[in-house]
Image (tube, rainbow, N blue to C red):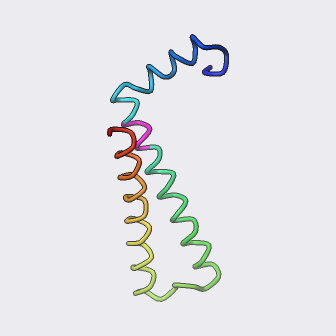
Amino acid sequence: RALSGPEAFDAVRRTLEHPAARLLVLAAVWALAHHLFAGIRHLLMDLHFGVSLATARRSALAVALGGGLVALATAWRLFA
């Protein structure tokens, strides 16, 4: 819709400036980042890297922290 003309672009921009839309974007970014990091973790585990219990727990924590850091950086950018 934003590519159909200047008026439509402004309408989309105004919609995305709403706090609820920004929260939705933030949730989507967190979900995508978490999914990406978890996918990389599982691919490495398929290659037999990090399959011990201690290493698997550390990599799970790294996935959670990585997704959280991406979400924090996004929140800083969206709400600053």
x 42%, y 59%: residue: 67
Quadrant in the picture for residue 24: top left
In this rendering, the count of numbered labels is: 0
Report x, y in % for residue 70.
43, 55
x 34%, y 46%: residue: 76
Q: Quadrant of the C terminus?
A: top left
Q: Is residue 56 above or below residue 4?
A: below
26 in magenta: yes
Which span is picked out in magenta? 23-27
Q: Is residue 45 above or below residue 16?
A: below
- Extreme-top residue of the structure: 7
Report x, y in % for residue 6.
60, 14
Quadrant in the picture for residue 4: top right
Q: Is residue 76 left or right of residue 9?
A: left
x 52%, y 58%: residue: 35
Report x, y in % for residue 20.
35, 29
x 40%, y 87%: residue: 54
Q: Nearer the viewer, residue 41 or 13?
A: 13
Q: Main secondary structure of the magenta part?
A: helix
24 in magenta: yes
Q: Nearer the viewer, residue 47 or 71?
A: 71
Report x, y in % for residue 26.
41, 42
Q: Quadrant of the N terminus?
A: top right
